[in-house]
Amino acid sequence: MKLYGSPLSGHTHRVRLFLSLLNLPYEFVQIDMRAGENRSPAHLARSPFGEIPVLEDGDVTLADSTAILVYLASKYDDSGRWLPREPLAAATVQRWLSNASGKIAYGPCVARLVVAFGMPFDHERAKSIAARLFDALEVELAGRRFALGDQPSIADVAAFSYIEHAPEGGVSLKPYPNIRAWLANVRALPGFVPMTATACGLASETY
């Protein structure tokens, strides 16, 4: 397998984390977003919208981080634990995947893009979205080790990267002990690999 992406991308880290949790070997090909490599003809042939990450697995080429998580869980997790089929568990995973592409993307992800990369987005709006999301997750994760309870799933993988790195966008995790405990539980999983911190992250408190 080949994975095209960036070490500073939370979307990329989701897939790198899950590949490691599944103990799947792959080649990482770095795409320099600042240099516009994601808009090169070669990359656009893999990802028509210029997105990262992109996974190549044999004759399969797939973009979109949450879609890649579903693909990997469906193909390589024989236990079925990472993408359960029980109706409520499956629906809960889907809700978290939707949050990863929605509230997480427009909240802590965008806030980080503003602070760490100087992107011209509305920082206050992103922080407000993140705060509302974290308020809700703090309640949901009370008494739970993971999104589904005691069992990790791709819901946790999809949500982890940008929430852990929210402080890089000026969003503190100090008010959220349940979220911080959940992050620690994900970090404790066998095969966990961290995401590269930006200069903002290295210069700031973790939480």
Image (cartoon, helix red, strand yellow):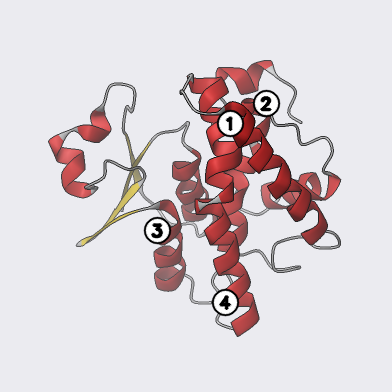
Labels 4 and 2 touching (C-beta < 8 A): no
Seen at 57% across and 54% down, the residue is: 157
Seen at 60% across and 51% down, the residue is: 159
Residue 147 location in percent, x, y? 69, 63
SS under mark 3: helix
Labels 1 and 2 touching (C-beta < 8 A): yes
Earlier-in-chain disc, 4 versus 2: 4
Residue 35 location in percent, x, y? 28, 21
Residue indicated by mark 1: 111
- In space, the residues marked 4 and 1 are separated at their CA atoms by 32 Å
Residue indicated by mark 4: 84
Mark 1 Cα-neighbour bin, 10 Å: few <14, some 14–19, many ≥20: many
Earlier-in-chain disc, 2 versus 3: 3
Q: Nearer the viewer, residue 134 or 17?
A: 134
Earlier-in-chain disc, 4 versus 1: 4
Residue indicated by mark 3: 68
Amino acid at pointer 3:
Ile
Amino acid at pointer 2:
Gly
- In space, the residues marked 1 and 3 are separated at their CA atoms by 24 Å
Relative height, residue 79 to residue 206 (above, below): below
SS under mark 4: loop
Amino acid at pointer 1:
Ala
Which dot, 1 or 3, sits closer to the camera? 1
Labels 2 and 3 touching (C-beta < 8 A): no
Seen at 53% across and 51% down, the residue is: 102
Relative height, residue 71 to residue 1 (above, below): below
Can you name the residue that lies furthest to the left here?
A: 41
Residue indicated by mark 2: 170
